Image (tube, helix red, strand yellow):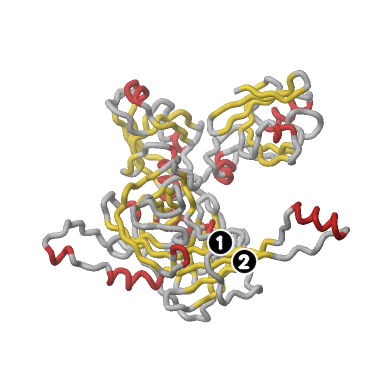
Amino acid sequence: MRSRTKLAAGLGIGAIAGIGLAVGVSGQMPGQAIPGGVPPVDTTPVVRNVPDGQAQVTLSFAPIVKSAAPAVVNIYTATVDRSRSANMDAFMQQFFGGSAPARPRVQQSLGSGVIVGADGLIVTNNHVVKGADQILVALSDRREYPAKLVFSDARLDLALLKVDTKGTPLPVIRMGDSNQAEVGDVTIAIGNPFGVGQTVTTGIVSAIARTGVGISDWQFFIQTDAAINPGNSGGALLDGQGRLLGINTAIYSQGGGSNGIGFAIPSRMVRVFLSAAQSGKLVSGWIGVEGEPLTAESARLAGMDRPGGLLVTGVVPGSPGARAGIRIGDVLRSVNGKDVADGGQLRYSLATEGVGRSLDVVLLREGREQRASVTVAAPPETPARQLTPITGQSILTGVTVANLSPAYAQELGAGLPEQGVVVVQMVGNAPAAQIGIRPGDIIEAVGGQPVKTVADVAAQASRGAVVVRWSRDGNSRECGVVNGRLACRP
């Protein structure tokens, strides 16, 4: 059986004690300030030594756990499901001439969180609290608090909760620098697996800069073999000094249990998220450069003896990358001393460095190494998104499309390109839905004519176009009406 990634979220284990129906979940209004701030980074150097003798082999992590565990909490959520199956409605209609009122069902789940503010701010995974009607936070000392959701970002799979402690300060985790982590470093995971209560497991950093594992749009994780199971989501991954290395997010598993392959969101990205919470919006850096990983053949053509780096395939005119002298065909090797192997690593570097920062970039051009300095900017929304529903009679009737831009592509996530026309939504019975088009797809041609903007799509649709070509994850497909029937070809 092929392995697959499963989010490490608990599934309805245990009752939620002490939750009242009055406990609500609130989203942050734009511009609303979040109390507190981003915790400072503990920059104490890590001392890396192998055990020297029996005395060191018998050393214990207990002092680290005692220091950090109070800042890791259990999170219980309840979601009221008032939906009712169509079969039940049909039954009630047939035998009673009407439908009975829906009885609400409460779906319960669990997870973990990390206290980042003494005034009651707690970071967890977005998937732990998404859609919850009630949230309860339980501390390691058995204190319980109802919590409210104050900020979240689905692209990062992070959420920020707030509890009212009535002025009593809470223990706060020490923040580490995930960029300093190395493969082989000791890790300690703390969370609430399967609802059994706070649990500590140990392991090592198995890999860093993991990308392409299908967990979130940012695609950059720390991998560890510390045992992580459902319920650990949102808990702490610590380094050997008890500092936060990351937020445990997912496991790679066939059966839902720990196979020794767990993923954590780096603490650097957690700090970016906390900074965004204060302004109410997450904006990642942008330099206007796109690329693809090198293959053995493209590396040979670039004068390299092995693949390594990002082959630049596009540079936006007037962008920070263009002003720094980056060209199509260059190989981007590193940003601020960190190797860049794919687009995910580049996006992570830009997100964690921040807008306005000047970054040192190492390039390879025609076999020669070159250096440049590029200043990170906020992504522009050019052209305007111009959300447009397609009406009339065409293959795209019932589809809403929009112009992509660097800003809008970042907002939508899912690794979308920074230009083109994207499907935003569609009605359920639209012809496009019947041929497999879905939100997030890129419209490439309508009626046999290439399209670059919403205006192009609308113009072709107004002429009654019956053929459309679109792409998803770089793969194109064309469908249309042939002899009165819908048909497709790759």
Q: Position of residue 450 (x, y in %)?
A: 64, 23
**Viewer-nearest of labels 1 and 2?**
1
Q: Which residue is mark 1?
A: 129
Q: Determine the residue positioned at 33% across, 40% down.
A: 339
At mark 1, the secondary structure is helix
Q: Amino acid at mark 2?
A: Val
Circles 1, 2 touching at the beta carbon (< 8 Å): yes
To which quarter of the image does residue 298 belong?
A: top left
| Residue sitting nearer the eye, 68 or 107 | 107
Q: Which residue is mark 2?
A: 25
Q: Residue furthest front?
A: 95
Give the mark, 1 or 2, whose residue is nearer the N terminus: 2
At mark 2, the secondary structure is loop
- Left or right of residue 22: residue 262: left
Return the mark for residue 399. Answer: none
Is 26 located above or below residue 354 in the figure?
A: below
Q: Position of residue 97 (x, y in %)?
A: 88, 58
| Residue sitting nearer the eye, 387 or 69 | 69
Q: Determine the residue positioned at 49% across, 63% down.
A: 111
- Left or right of residue 150: residue 59: left
Q: How many marks?
A: 2
